[in-house]
Every structure is written in C-alpha cells, then in structure tokens.
Image (cartoon, grey):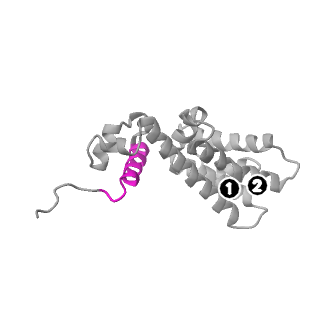
Amino acid sequence: SSPRKTYHHGDLRKVLLDAARAEISAHGAQGLSMASLARRAGVAQSAPYRHFSDREDLLAAVATDGFERFTQVLLEAASNGDDVTALKRMAIAYLAFGEKNVELYRLMFASGLVPGAASDSALKRAATASFQPLLDRVTASDPKSSLMSAHVRWGQLHGLVMLKADGFIDDLVEALVNTISF
C-alpha cells in the first residue's frame, strides 16, 4: 500500500489556538479571520470550523484560555511570599501580565466578548474566576473591605494596564504599583 499523502495534526484545536494567540499578539484580534488562522496553522480553510463554529467562538476560546492563564499568574504571585505583601505581588503580576500580553488583554477585557457571553459559558466562568484571587486577597488583608474595594483596586490596575498599552504612561510595572496603595 502507498503511504498516506495527507498531513494530520495531533491536536488541531491546540495548533489553532496557538496560531490565533500568535496572530492576536502580533496584529490584534480585529484582523484575525478563520482563513488567516488556517494559513498560519498550515491547514485547509475549512479545518478551523471542525473545532470552532465561527470567529467569535474562536476568540471566546482564546479569551477563556487567557483568563485561565491570568488567574494562575495571580494565584502564583499571591502564594510566593508572605501574606503582608501578597496583594502588592498580585498587583505587580497583574500589570506584568497586561504589559506582556497587550493584545490578549484587550481581547479579554476590552472586546465585549465577556459581557455578551452566556452566564453558563466557559468564558464567563473563566472571567469571573479571574477576579476571585484579587477579591480574596483584598478581603483577607482587610476583613472590613467590600466588593467595592476590590473593584476599585481592579479598576486602578486595569486603568494602568490600558494607559500603558495605549502609550499614555511609560513607567515600569513596579513603579506603577508603588504609586497606588496596595
């Protein structure tokens, strides 16, 4: 029998997600199409549709993965030291993640994907879970703190990430954290 003449990816979904992350990192999510993704992954134009119903489904999967990685970064920062400085370490990790992953961060927080996601979707669950480490740490550091206090800190961090990403500030991550009370 003759050898098979087709190429098969072992995990096409992972290859497509990796290609989408690379495209988003290089050019932002707005220019990503299923056809450009297929080209980047080296597969037929129809191949992405075997794993994602459409572009929005693909972007939701990339954002979900981004939120899961973001949550892990925050949890690791919180656990790498004493409780007194845990919130500051998380703030530094938050800003560093946003700075290192600007376009992914924009997709996660500024694309409208999360507000439009179904309440039981993986994306909505991952986005909600990404806020929990900050909320837990804020209430652990000051039991009288409220949800509003955690939202204010989140807003400060988010604002700093976006201001830096858009070129309004040039400060280093740790210098930014030192300017706000954590």
Percent position of residue 63, x then y: 52, 44
Q: Earlier in the sequence, mark 2 or mark 1?
A: 1
Q: Amino acid at mark 1?
A: Met
Q: Nearer the viewer, residue 120 or 89?
A: 120
Report the side of 126 relative to 88 (left or right): left
Nearest the eye: 127 or 76: 127
| Residue 95 in sight from this viewpoint | yes
**For numbered disc 1, what is the local secondary structure?**
helix
Picture coordinates of residue 32, whole percent (x, y): 38, 37
Q: Please provide the residue range marked out in magenta.
A: 9-26
Q: Position of residue 162 (x, y in %)?
A: 58, 39
Q: Which mark is residue 47?
A: none
Residue lying farthest front?
1
Residue at 54%, 43% (x, y): give it: 105
Q: Residue at x 64, y 49 (%)?
A: 130
Residue at mark 2: 137
